[in-house]
Image: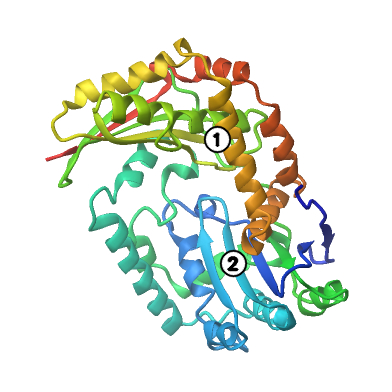
Amino acid sequence: MLNQAFNKGCLSNGLRYILYPVEDTSLVCVNMFYFVGSRDEEPDKTGFAHLFEHLMFAGSENVPSFDNEVESAGGVNNAFTTQDYTDYFIELPADNIELALWLESDRMHHLNINERSLNIQKNVVIEEFKETHLNQPYGDLFHILSDLCFTNSPYRWPTIGLSPEHIEKATIKDVKLFYDKWYQPSNAILAISGKFQDNIEDLIKKYFENIPSNPINERNYPLDNPIDHQVKKIVKRDVPLNLIVIAFPVPGRLSTDYSTYDILSDILGNDNSSRLYTSLVKDKKLFISVDASLMGSVDPGLMLIIGIVKPSVDIKKAEAALWDELVNFNKKPITDRELDKVRNMYISSLSMDIYDLQKVGFELSFYEALGNAELLFENYKIYKSITKEDIMNLADRLFNPDRAFVLNYLKK
């Protein structure tokens, strides 16, 4: 049975906090979620959210070396950035929780942004951009795909940014403006999961309540209009194998149908027993791999079907076979076994995440940012309630070749 017991609160400066107690552990995880990602950037200043993931470890007023402080307390820490949010966490022995709160409050209020630290982190991020997106096979795939599928939405650039030049040109003034706007209590959620004292709320107030804050304006980013014809692009690169992407526009994370889209994508291409893999890799031997997934974005995003074509197979034949599977999805009715498998995989994953202090802290923060942390546990019931008819009706509406983006990423 899932432990669904947690408490929530909010400080006078707008900082929300979530307390998820776990008794049978000696550890605690302090998770600081900032509701800022690459969609919040300016089109000519992209990559800033990811840059800040690095800058937040570069030292603050009272902590010249963040990592050293955490490691000396027997802890570990890390962070990750997406198009919608940036998440930081410190996991350490429960007796040292006050250190973690002090560290997070110091870099929330007194991050040490100077020319030296900025130049060091800019170089790190630029090298990462070159290594992962410019100098490896398929590295620019999501730059091409984002530009193909989004015209107005800020999802039209990936988290790493449009170009390393945007980071290269970033000034102290630019990054301080970004920090002052987004890295403040009213745009953050503190989640503490694990073992903590009864006075934990007093400690949260001690370290965070005096940090000044301004309200964040409601986000009203432009969205893209529905398409009524297929949009296709063909690129050639120095890669070993041809690759096909079919992308369908889907609603955002708060859509009432989101969980149905999620189950549909898992039936299609979650693992080696999924429909696409079984048909196109095992039986017809046209692809080396085929996967299906959702962006999982806050605003409307994409369902992505990505297949790597076998060397001897013509790209047109492979794409036709992929479309045949999609448009004829309902000619092979969903079985109880298929539906039970993917539902059970989700529920099992949720159940295991509850025992991972960092994951449960992040998930609760994410759903709280969307509106209500309780949504995490409501998903348990929602996924169990989805029927075969729900999925087949959705497949009928979704798999229309005239409402898809297609990318042929070919070897030269």
Residue type, mark 2 in image:
Tyr
Residue closest to the eye, 265 or 338: 338
Circle on res. 300: 1
Specify whether residue 47 is in view: yes
Residue type, mark 1 in image:
Pro
Residue that extends furthest to the top in the rendered view of this protein: 331
Q: Give yes or no for contact between labels 1 and 2 (Cβ–Cβ under 8 Å).
A: no
Q: Residue at x 60, y 28 (%)?
A: 260
Question: In the image, is residue 79 above or below residue 250?
Answer: below
Q: Residue at x 39, y 36 (%)?
A: 272
Question: In the image, is residue 52 above or below residue 341?
Answer: below
Where is residue 360 drawn, in percent x and y?
Answer: 67, 57
Where is residue 249 drawn, in percent x and y?
Answer: 48, 29
Q: Is residue 386 left or right of residue 120?
A: right
Question: In the image, is residue 307 above or below residue 193?
Answer: above
Where is residue 405 drawn, in percent x and y?
Answer: 37, 28
Q: Earlier in the sequence, mark 1 or mark 2?
A: 2
Single out the mark in the foreground, 1 or 2: 2
**Distance from Cα at disc 1 to Cα at disc 2:** 25 Å
Where is residue 192 drawn, in percent x and y?
Answer: 73, 67
Residue closest to the eye, 143 or 138: 138
Q: Quadrant of residue 99?
A: bottom right
Residue closest to the eye, 220 or 397: 397
Q: Residue at x 33, y 56 (%)?
A: 163
Q: Residue at x 59, y 42 (%)?
A: 298
Kind of element beneath mark 2: strand
Q: Is residue 128 left or right of residue 330?
A: left
Specify whether residue 219 is in view: no
Q: Is residue 330 left or right of residue 345?
A: left
Q: Mark 2 sits on what residue?
A: 88
Circle on res. 186: none
